[in-house]
Amino acid sequence: MASESPSPAATAGASLAQRTTAEREADQNAVDDAQYRKDWYRKNASIAEWAYRTLVILQLAFAAAVPVSAAARAPEWVAALFGGIAAVLTGTQQTLGLGQEYVRLNATHVRIDRELRLHRALAGPYASAEAPAQLLATRVEEIVAEDTTRWSAWHLKEEKGEKDRSRDAENAPQTEAPIGSGDDAGRR
């Protein structure tokens, strides 16, 4: 009768029993750290989503208030105020990049969650790993490093874009004022 070889999970379980207390604590620390990072990304993704959705709803509300105030024959400054607020909200949302931030944070959260699930089940790359917790720590650290790189690249791109726009504005040729921009501009 041929003896069956033990499953990877059974082998991993047996080797875990033989580990020292310090090794088991290190393993638990790796899992706790991964869980902490997952929770951090989930919380911050939720905050970014809430802020993004709130700004978009406010943008729509103030933009919609412009024609409503005009139709209600409100003073002209009311429509201008609503339009100005809508523009500031749009600029704020674009500058902060909350939509992109939410997507980035949520994607990282999902990737870390996947690693934790695979680790708990000793599936995927963890099935044959000699040290599953160390592999988890390494893979989570790689995910966080990728996210940090994406975040930095986005912010550097935005910063460079601002510098380019400022430089372009400084170097733009001066033109004469358009017709109607003199003392009577804006009068009807």
Image (tube, rainbow, N blue to C red):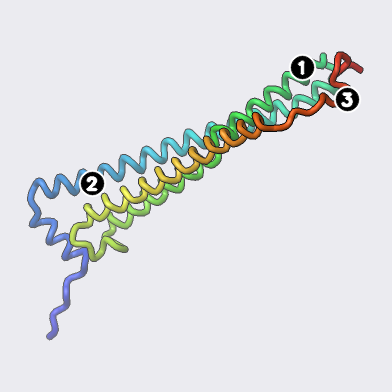
C-alpha distance separating marks 3 and 2: 68 Å
Q: Quadrant of the N terminus?
A: bottom left
C-alpha distance separating marks 2 and 1: 57 Å
In the image, residue 107 lies at what x, y percent? 45, 48
| Residue at the spot of label 2 | 30
Decide: few, some or many residues near mark 1? Use Cα within 10 Å; few <14, some 14-19, many ≥20. Answer: some
In the image, residue 125 lies at what x, y percent? 29, 62
- The answer to whether one can see residue 98 in this image is no
Q: Amino acid at mark 3?
A: Ile
C-alpha distance separating marks 1 and 3: 27 Å
| Helix, strand or loop for disc 3 | loop
Decide: few, some or many residues near mark 3? Use Cα within 10 Å; few <14, some 14-19, many ≥20. Answer: few
Q: Earlier in the sequence, mark 3 or mark 2?
A: 2
In the image, residue 142 lies at what x, y percent? 33, 51
Q: Which mark is residue 179?
A: 3
| Residue at the spot of label 1 | 78
- Horizontally, residue 139 falls left or right of residue 157, namely left
Who is closer to the viewer here, 121 or 112? 112
At x 57%, y 38%, the residue is 161
Q: Earlier in the sequence, mark 1 or mark 3?
A: 1
Q: Amino acid at mark 2?
A: Ala
